[in-house]
Image: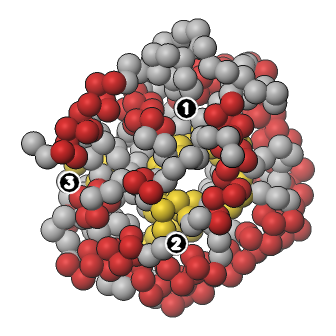
Amino acid sequence: MTKETVFCLLSLAALCFSCGNKQKTYEEIGSSGLTTRTENLQANIRTFVNKGVLIGQLYGTLEGVGWREDSVGHSDIRSICHDGPACSGYELCGIERGLKVNSDSIAFEAICNDALRLFKRGGLVVMSWTMPNYRGDNKVFEVWTERLADYLSSLQDDYGIKAPVMLLPCPQDGLSWYTKLSPEAYKSLFEKVKDRLQSLGVVNVLYGSSWTELNDRGRIERSLPDGIDVLQLSLIQNKGSRESTYQARLNNELSMLMNIAHSRNLASGLTTGMKGLPATNYFTDVFLPILHKHRLSYVLLGANRGDPSRAHFYVPYPGCDERLIDDFIKFYNDDLTIFLSNLNGLYLRK
């Protein structure tokens, strides 16, 4: 048994998860009404850009090529560079209807356990809620948001310490029903969700707004809710597009993202990747120059899943083309990129 495996098992044994169980919290609450760790994250997420960018993955320690829901914090990233992702992203769609699994068929209990493991090790937890259409029925809205609030509040260990969460409600994915709303109506919906969660006593959540396109600044400005801390771009490239096309679009979109975020004193995040990594130099020659140009707070790479024949991966995995692995190792060793082992103090007061 390796030292790394022993550490993972001990970390798992040290946690007693309360997912789904109500219990009193002994967490210290700050002057804003948030937990002190959440307040510290609120300040630090903006200043960490001076140190580098946190690199992580969607479901990074819950699934990969050929495996799913490993119980000791395995990840394809760790298998490649012997270090864990500094942040992980999770979808919460389905929690509002009382389902056991989310819209990506991942168990909510597994998400809870995984998020708490990551928090215990100092990583950033990012969650999205792609809200179904409640068709204006306020009773449905109240039930759904209460279930969401219960889940978010249950992300605490046996000592009542809650994991701070960066929550992205109603992400603008171009497909969901709320993307057809006017900017004013979308802003009102977002703030309705945020106000409802706060009224239900959720004290471990910061809010962010996520977009797949940022080509209409006026519309975005009118849509952005008050009281958010992060503006995120989501640009996942499926097969079929050239690396140069992807790189040009990502660069343009991030320029807009940074302009808007700077004008509103927001941190900036990114979810991205090219499916199947068609370019063996993607990380060093396509992606890394963009990261050096646009100082982001965090990056979530697309999820790895399924068997190798499906080529559904955005991070190299054991057994793939060695050139992809070598390229990712160079990316990992760049001074700009922050992985779990060199992430320190995200939840500490500066």
Q: Nearer the viewer, mark 1 or mark 3?
A: 1
Q: Is residue 292 visible?
A: yes
Q: Nearer the viewer, residue 350 or 241?
A: 350
Q: Amino acid at mark 1?
A: Ala
The span from disc 1 to disc 3 (Cα, nearest Å) is 29 Å
Q: At 73% across and 69% down in the image, what residue appears?
A: 257
Give the residue furthest to the front. 350
**For the residue labelled by badge 3, is the local secondary structure a helix, a strand or a loop?**
loop
- Against 288, residue 135 (above or below) is above
**For the residue labelled by badge 2, is the local secondary structure a helix, a strand or a loop?**
loop
**Residue 263 location, quadrant:** bottom right
Q: Residue 139 in the image: x percent, y percent?
A: 74, 18
Q: Amino acid at mark 3?
A: Gly
Q: Is residue 271 visible?
A: no
**For the residue labelled by badge 1, is the local secondary structure a helix, a strand or a loop?**
loop
Dot 2 or dot 3, earlier in sequence: 3
Dot 1 or dot 3, earlier in sequence: 3
Q: Nearer the viewer, mark 2 or mark 1?
A: 2
The residue that disc 3 covers is: 66
The span from disc 2 to disc 3 (Cα, nearest Å) is 30 Å
Q: At 82% across and 38% down in the image, what residue appears?
A: 191
* Label 1 crowd bin: few (<14), some (14–19), many (20+), radius 10 Å: many
Q: Nearer the viewer, residue 186 or 74?
A: 74
Dot 2 or dot 1, earlier in sequence: 1
Q: Give me the disc on residue 163.
A: 1
Q: Residue 226 in the image: x percent, y percent?
A: 86, 46
The residue that disc 2 covers is: 336
- Mark 2–mark 3 CB contact (< 8 Å): no
Give the residue furthest to the bottom. 244
